[in-house]
Every structure is written in structure tokens, then in C-alpha cells.
Amino acid sequence: MSIKHIATACLLIVMVLLPAACRGTNNSLRNSVVIAITPDVESLNPLYSFTYYEGMISELLYLSLVQHDWDFEQGELATKPMLAESYTWSDDSSSIKIKLRGDVFWSDGKRVSTEDVVTSFLLYSNPDVQSRFFGMFKNFYLLDNLTIDKEKTFTVDDSLEFSIHFKESTNPSLVDIDMPIIPAHVFANIPPHEIINKEKELTPVTNGPYNLSSWNINQSIVLTANTKCFLQQADGIKELIFKIVPDYNSGLIQLKNNEINILEGIRPADAKELKMSDELIVAPIEGRDYDYLGWSNIDVDVYKRSGKKIPHKLFGSSSVRKALALAINRQEILIGYFNNFGQIASGPVAPVFKAFYNTSVVPYPFNPNSAKMLLKSAGWVDADGDGILEKGKVLFSFTIFMPAGNASRDFASTVIKNNLKAIGADVKIEMLEPGVFFEKMFNRELDAWIAGWSVPIPIELKAYWHSNLEENQLNISGFNNAEADGLLEKISSTGETQQKNKMIEEFQNIIHQEEPVTFLYWIDNITAHTKAINGIHVSPLGVVHHPWNWTIK
């Protein structure tokens, strides 16, 4: 999938991909692969492919300028040309010169050209289009409405060669040009504000390694290999079937019966049995999803009234937040529910990012006695002997909110409540309908909550931890640290890799000392696929990644 297709505002959702089978029960004997998805998709147009599944499928239909693999040794992206034949950065990295491949054609026969690239960028950045990439072009020259300034940004040499010029004092990278290219001639005569209403009426004109063969609503989406595409190989997979199977148990049965070939989001309790199968490979996607216990660091009522940030009466002290981390037996949850498919988290940077993961930062251990001592040092004592701590007239009493319908968090909440009771906290757990929960969380109406984040690649930290809450609304806890702010600003503007990595390591030290939230654990997305498929490399980029490299044994 395109690295720029990231749901930065989405809470962690356990994803279950459940495939399709309409033509027999042994898919491994055919030159096709069946991949399960839970909901149907709304759009396969890259402009509006907002969801995980929509992005996964649409990016098999449309090429981007570059493509990515995961470098396991370095723990970072390895990027190379895709639609671009070559690219060259200027000495000061203020511009990039790109030459397109000359052998790429749209499905209607027209050759892909620089006009398509320029039009794609302009449409993605136009607010009237309402595309999924709108607002993601901060390194480009922009007009007042945030549309890319065509004249300042693009220099077109001919139909295959062009340059992109970036705004001064920015730190551009290949991620800035990583998005599916769409056909200019299809959208040329449609006013930008009308595209969103007309896009479903348009016949898909694609240029990727697969063509859209059929789309049966709420049943399946079938892609067939585009044999004219330079990515395809003679013995590659000829057909990908994305089957809509919204019921988890049904998908599990179909996987066992060899009716589907790839399943994501497998529950830990089922993974052990699947591992015993001679026909399946069970592999976790490690290290991008974590759950956390959120604490409001600031008094939100005061902040909303005046913009001032004063410490929250319960959770405003880092000593209290450290005590809460020490009080929770995260290992019990990892073993009891996740069967160790995951690891305890020490901060917001995952261990898979080896280039800048700070190995010296160790998760707080389960130590209730140390937790009690920290709370006592912060003034929290059980003066009346009722088992509940107080500080003056303030009781250490609070409600932890969480979205209903998540089995792992249900399990975790029971452990957490019991652990916190043992150190003198009066804790209630309250489930909310997910839509209500998310609204309250993003509106900063909760003092304590259980949620999760899916970490984007490349990693993004400023949006989640910088204290400018107007600009960085994903900093739900209201974390406020001047030293961290300075590092985050430098990280965003620094191009030199080693220097940036060192600053990210320093940032992790600050987060560990402040513990703005209780980082619980990194959760593996457990996948299973048929052994008969060669070439699947499960990585932080997913399981359905570059399927044109797959073959059937």
C-alpha cells in the first residue's frame, strides 16, 4: 500500500481480512488467491479510497511514482522507483527531477505522461475535490486554499520528464511524492467540486499490475493480472479475489477448508490451532499497533475556557502517571489474552523501527509497592483507612472509559481495575458505543480511557505529542513538555538521517520520564496464509503487499 495512505486519526481497529470463494473449495490448485475482507468497499478511486481495504485494492489498480519494501535489518523503508524510471534530487534537496517509464499505458490505451502526474497532485490537493490526501502537502508551494501552486511546483520538460520544486526551509522526502497516479484525460472535463458525486459513474481507467474484472456488491471484488504491466511475471498470480466475509467465525472455517487463502486479524486463541495445520503459515504483522491507558494531563475545563494548561488534579503529575504504569500487570494481559502475540510497550516508538528505537528505555515493571511509594511521595495517602487514597479532600477515584465490543480491552479492563484497586484507586469501568466514545475522546471530555493507535510509516510523532493542541489534535492527553516540543520541531525539519534518529531516541527518554499515558503493549496482527503461495513476505507493510511477486507452488 502507498505509505502516504495512513489513517492518522484512526484509533486502532483489529482488522479481519476474510476471503472469497465462489468457484470450488481448493483454491491452491488454481492460479488465483482469495483474500478476505470484512466490510465491502465504497470506492476504488484513489481520490476517495479512505479505508484500509479501499487503499489496499485501489493501489493494485493504480501505480505510484515509487514503491516500498520493508528492510528488516535496518527496520525502515526501502524505496525504489515504480512508475518513475529514475529520480535525482538536487544538491540541496529542494527539488527532484523525475523521468517516467515509457512503457506504461492506461487501460484505454493512452500512454501515462507527466500530465497525469501533475493533474493527480493538483486534484489530490484541491479542497473542492475532498480527496483522502488533502492537507498532506505542507512541503509544497501552496495557494491560499491549500491547492498545490502549479507554476511554482512543476517544471515539465516533456511527456516523460519533469521536476518538482519544494517550498524553502522544508524537509521533503520520497514520501511526499508517494501516491497513486490517476488519468488526467478522465477528469479533464469534470469541475473539481463535481468529482466526488460523479466518480462512481466513471468507468475505471487504470494502469497498475491488475485490472478490475468484477465488483459484486457485498460479495466480492475480482482483479485480473494486467499482463502488459512491467511488474507482472509469466508465472505470477492471474487473479486476486477479495471476498467480503463480515463474520469472523465464518472466515476461520473457510480458511481451514481451503476456501480462502489469506486471513488477517486472527484471534490469539485460534492461532495455536492454525499453527498445527500442514497447509497454513501463521505469521504476525509486528509492531505498529499499540493499546494504551490514557490520562488527561491537564484540566480540560480550564483549557477550554481560557486556553491555559494547568495540571489535572489526579493525573497532572508524572510521579502519579509512573505509579499507575507500575501498578498494572501488563504481562498478565499479554499471556492471558494475547498468548504472547505482542510485547510490553515502553513508548510510542515500536521496536520494529530499529534505526531509532531506544533500547535503553525499558518498560516500567509490575511493582505495586513502588507504585504506592510514588503515590505517597506525591501526597496521596489513605488517611481514613477506607482503602481509597486521598489528597486533602480529593479522592483518588475515577472512571476509565472504553469503546464497547473489543474483547481484548474487556479482558484488560478487568485486570487493570483490580490492579489499581490494590494500590488504593477507586476505579469504575464504563463502556460506550464506539461512535460516542470517539467523539468524547477527541473532544477531550474523558479523564481516563483505554484506546489504541496504529503507527504510520514513516513514523509521525509531532501530531500525537506536541503541546500545541490546536495544531496537534491527536495529543488527546494534553502532554505538555517544552523540551519534547523542541525535539519534535527539529525532527520535522531535519533531513540528515543520523541526526534525526538521535533526536527520536532522545524524545523517547523524555516520554519515558514523563509517562503521559500508560503504554500497555504492542499488538501483533496475526495472519495466516496458504503454504501453496510463494513470495508472501509478512512485514509492517502488511500481508497483501506486492502480490505480483507471488506464485503458486
Image: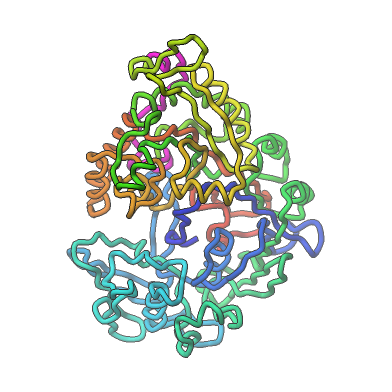
Q: Is residue 463 left or right of residue 131?
A: left
Q: What percent of the width, then of the height, locates residue 91?
A: 18, 65
Q: What percent of the width, then of the height, locates residue 522?
A: 49, 37
Q: Nearer the viewer, residue 497 or 69?
A: 497
Point 39% across, 62% down: residue: 80
Q: Nearer the viewer, residue 518 or 231?
A: 518
Magenta stretch encompasses residue 184: no
Q: Is residue 111 above or below residue 25?
A: below
- Which quarter of the figure has residue 391? top left
Q: Is residue 105 left or right of residue 514?
A: right
Point 29% across, 74% down: residue: 144
Q: Is residue 112 above or below residue 293?
A: below
Q: Is residue 125 left or right of residue 422?
A: left
Q: Is residue 240 above or below residue 293?
A: below
Q: What percent of the width, then of the height, locates residue 429?
A: 58, 32
Q: Main secondary structure of the magenta part?
A: loop
Point 50% across, 60% down: residue: 1
Q: Is residue 497 above or below residue 234?
A: above
- Which quarter of the figure has residue 375? top left
Question: How many numbered discs, if any?
Answer: 0
- Residue occupying the far bottom of the picture: 189
Q: Which residues are magenta?
A: 349-373
- Residue occupying the far right of the picture: 24
Q: Is residue 240 left or right of residue 362?
A: right
Magenta stretch encompasses residue 354: yes
For the C terminus, the image quarter is bottom right
Point 28% across, 75% down: residue: 143
- Which quarter of the figure has residue 544? bottom right
